[in-house]
Image: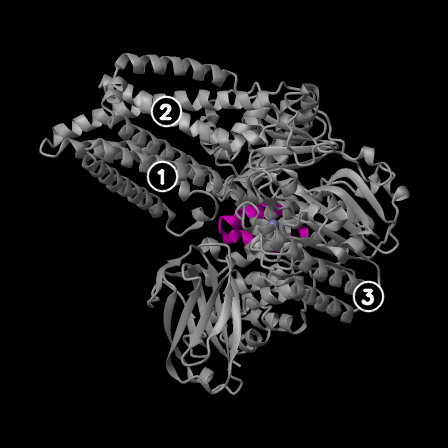
Amino acid sequence: MSSAASRGVLLGACAGLLLGLNDFGAMWLWLDMASDRWVLLNRVLGLLVPIGALVGAVSAVAVLAVAHVLARIAPARAASYALADAVTLWLSPALVMLAWALFSGGSASRVAGVALWKPATAALLIACAWVGTHLLGLVIRACESARRARILAAMLLVSAQLLIKLNQWVLPNLYDYLHGALALACFALLSVGLGVLASSAQRLRHATASPALGAALLLLSSLWGAHHVRALSSNQNVAVAMLDARACHTRALMLIATPWLPREHPPARPHRPSPRVDPSQSSIARIAPTHSAGAHVLLITIDALRADHLGTYGYKRPTSPKLDALAAESLVFERAYAQAPHSSYSLSSLMTSEYLHETLDLGAPPPNATLATTLAAAGYHTAAFYTLGIFHTAAERLGLYEKTAFGFALHDHQDREPEALTDRVLSEIDRALAQGEPNTLIWAHYFNVHEPYRATTFGTTDIDRYDSEIARADAAVERLVREAKRRFKRDVITIITADHGEEFREHGGVYHGSTLYEEQVRVPLIIHGTGMTPQRFAAPVELLDVAPTVLGFVDVGRAASMRGDDLRGFLERPSAAPPAFSAVIHKRMVVKWPHKLIADLRFGLFELYALDQDPTERRNLASKDPALLSTLRDEVYGWLDSLALDDNPPDDPRVLAIDQGRLGDRRAVPSLVALIQDESADTAMRREAGAILGKLADPKSTEGLLAALSAKQPLVAAEAAIALGRMHHTGGRDLLRNLVLSEDPDIRSRAAVSLGRLRDVAAVPALIDALWIAPNDYEREEAIRWLGRLRDPRAIEPLISLLPESRTRHLVVIALGAIGDPRGFDTLRDVLQWEDHANVRDSTVRALGMLKDPRGLSLLLPLAVSDPTLKHATESLVRLGAIEQGAIGGIDFDKRTRAPGVTRCTEFSDRHDWDYLHRTVCETSRAQVTLHMSLPSTVVQSAGGSVWVMAMRRVDGQEPATVSVQIGQQPAQQVPVDSAWTEARWNVDAGSLSEGRTRVQLNVMPESARLALDHVLVLPR
Ligand SMILES: [Zn+2]
C-alpha cells in the first residue's frame, strides 16, 4: 500500500507539473514584465504540483483499498477487474456532479423532465467510465513488452496533450463545470500515461515505489504549496492571470477552492451618497443646448455592435460611412458603457434606468416604470420592434419585461433582416401619421450584427463578416433615420446605441456576456435631433442615462425609480459626470476616466488599467498603484452600498430594516418580523413592516406574521392578515373577511386583493369597490385580475364600465373572458370593432377564446386568416374547439399525439396558463417527421385556398434552422425556425388539397436540429 501511495505521489506531481507548464505556456506572453512571468510560473507549479501529488496519493490508496475489498467480495474475478471497478467508483462522485451541473441553470434547467435527466446522465457517464477503465486495463495488460508499453504511454500522453489544448481553446470563459471536468480528465490521462511509461523501465519502477521518496516529495511539495496559497493575492497581475480562461486547469482549481480562500472584508465605512444629479435641483434646463417638448423619439439599438468598429469611433475600415455622417451633426458620447455585456440585462437597464444586474441580486423587485410607460403616461404612442431572443439569458429574472414588452403598447417580435426591419418601422410611422401624428416613441432593435455573422463584403474571417454585417446595419439604420425625419412633421430625437460589444479573442474569449473588457462593454451612443449643436463628449456615461436624457429632451418628468442622469446637465462640464459602472456574473467594473477597475470581489482580485495609455487593457496597475486601486475600489463598494441603502443612513436599525425591505432586500426579513411583533414599537412602523413583508413574500416571515395576527393594535393585525394573503397563506382569512368591510378605502382594497388570492368569493364586492378606491395602480390592476379569476358574474357590469379607460383595457378584456359569462361576448365583439391598439385587440381575441362562446368561432376565423399580428387568434380557435368541429384542420400536439419522429410530448402546468397552446408541446427526435392529419371539407373546398400556420421553436441551439414542409405532392415550403416560439404562415392554393387524410412531411436542416412543435393549423381562406 505504501509503495502504491508513493507511486501516486510521484505520478500526480508529474501530471500536475505538465498541466502547470501548459497553463503557463498559454499565459506567459500575456504578462507584461519578466518578473511577473517568473512569479506566475512559480505560483502555477507551486499549486498544481502539490495538489497533483496529494490527489495522486489519495487516489492510489483509495483505489487500492476499494479494489482489495472488491476482490474479497468476489474472489473468483480477476484482480485487474477489481482495480478497474475501483477506479470507476473513485471517479463516480465527480461524474455525478458533472451530470447535475449540466442540467442546472440557464435553459437546461427548463428542459422537460430535468429531474430524470440528471440521474440518467450520471448513470450513463459512470457506465462509460466503467467501460473505459476496463478497456484501458485490457490494453495495458496486453502491452507486456517494454516497447509496446512505451508506445501506449506515448499515445496516452499525446491524447492528454490534445485534450489540454481543447480545454484551453474551446469556449473559454463559458461553462466552468465543463472545463473543470476536462481538467480532471487531463490529470487522469497524464497520470496513467506516466504510470505506463514508468512501468516499462525496470529501474524506474523500483525507484518510484520507494515509500521514503514519496513521503519526502509529498512533505516538500505541501510546504511549497502552503507558501503559495498564503501569497495568493500578493501579486494582482499574477492572481488575475491564474483566473484567466486560458489557464484553464489553474482556473478550475481556483474556482473549486473559492469557498475556502481568504476573502476581502472591507472595513465599515461611512456611507457616501452617490454623486447623482437631482434634475429638479440642477440648472439643466438653463444650460441644455436644446429642448424639444413634444418631439417624437426614435430609439435604435444594434445588437452586439462594439463602439470601436464604427468610423466615428476611430475604426479604419469603412464599416459605417452613413452613421459617421450622421454622427458629425449629432451629440456623440465617446465612452458609453452597457450595464452588462448581455442583451437581457443591458436592454432592461436601458429601458428602466436601473442597475438590474445588482438590484435583482439584492432581491429588489424589478421596477414597473420604463421609458415607454413614462412616455405613454404623457400621451405618447409607443411601439417596439425586437426579437424575443434578447431575453435568452436571465429569462426567469427578467420575465416581467418579456411579458410586458417593457410597457410598449405595440410590440412586434418578428425576426427581420435589417432592411425589412426598417420597412416595418416606416410602415408604423405612416400608420401614426394617418392617425393624426400623435407623439410617438419607437424602439427598433437590429439583430444582424449578432453572430452568426453572414455578410461577406469585407471577407470571410469572423471579423470580416462581423464588419460586413455592421455595414448592412449602417445602411438600414441611416435609411430609417432619414425617412423618419422626412415623414414626421414634428421634430424627432434619434438615439443610436448598442446593448453590448463583441469579443474576437482580445482577452482570450469570443462573443459576449463573459468579461468587462472594453470590447464587450463599450458601445456607441449617438443622439441626433433638429437644432442640436454637434458635440463630442469624452467622459464615461452609461446606457442607464439614456431614458432620463430622452425624457429631459422631450420635457417629460422621469419616473421616481430611474437612477440614471440627464446627460444634458454635463454637456458643458464633463468633469462633473459620475463614473460608469457595469457588471457580469461576479465581476463589477467602474470607469472613472482615464482609469478603469475590474473587481472580482469573491477573490479580492483587481485589474486596474489606464485607458488613455493602455486602451487594449494589457497592463494591470493594481499592484503598482495601491492608492488609486483603493480609491476606485471604494467607488465600487460605494456604488453597491448606494443600491442597497437609501441615501441617508438612519441610526435606528429598524428604520434601516424598513429601508432595506423597501429596496426588496430579503436580509431585512428577520428584523421586520421582530418589528411587527414588537408591541412597544411605533404603530406606523409596525404596519409598514407588515406591508413590506407581504411584498417580500418570504416564507421565513410566515410564523411572525401569524403571531402578529393577535397584535393588540388592530391595524397591525390587519397588515399581518393582508401580508399573509399576499403570500397565499390562509392564516388570516377570517380577519380578511372582516377587513373587506372596512371603511378605510386603502385597507378595504388591499384586503380584498389578499382575500381574492385565497380564491374567496367574499372578496368580490370589495374588489369591485377597489376598481375605484384602490390606493395605487398596482392594487387596482390586481383587483381587475382577481375579479377575472374568481369568475363571479357580479363583476361583469363594473368591469365593462372601466372599458373607456385605455390604460387598463387589456386587463379588463382578459377578466371578461375569464369570467366566462355570455354577457361578455357582445362587449368583447364591440371592442374588436373600435379598438386599434394591437395589444388590446390581441388580448380581446384571447379573451374570446377563454369565453368559450360558440359564436366566437365565426368571429375569430376571418381575423386569424387576415391579421397575423393577432398572436392569440389561433390559440382561441383551438380553445373554441375549431379542430374538433371541423371548422379548421390541423393538429394541436398533445400527450396523445403519435407520429413517426415525434417524441416527448409534454403538458406544462397551469403556471403557463397565459400560453394556452404552448402548454402541450412535442419534440422531434430526428430530421424527418411525418404527420398525418385529416382535412375537413370546409378547408379543402374553400375557394380562397388555405392558410397554414405552424408554431415551433428550436430546442437544441440558438442558430436558425430551416424546416421544409411538404404537403402531399405540393412543392416544399421552407420555414426558418430559431429558439423562440414563432408561428410561421404560408398560403396554399385552392384545389390543391384533397379531403381526408393528408401526409405532411417535415425535413429539418441541419439534420441534427431538434424542434418543439406546438401546432399545425389549416385555416380556410
Ligand atoms: Zn445582445
Region of the chain picked out in magenta, as a range: 748-776
Query: Who's the residue at 17% across and 27% down the image?
Result: 69
Magenta span contains residue 301: no
Residue 45 drawn at (x, y percent)? 45, 22
Assess mark 3: CB under 8 A from ligand 1? no
Question: Would you place residue 365 above or below residue 444 in this image?
Answer: above
Question: Would you place residue 830 above or below residue 749 in this image?
Answer: below
Q: Is residue 718 visible?
A: no
Give amino acid for label 1: Ser
The residue that label 1 is drawn on is 159
The residue that label 3 is drawn on is 486
Q: Residue 421 appears in which quarter of the rendering? A: bottom right
Describe residue 20's horizontal placement relative to residue 565 as left or right. Answer: left
Magenta span contains residue 774: yes
The residue that label 2 is drawn on is 14
Which mark, by number, is residue 784?
none
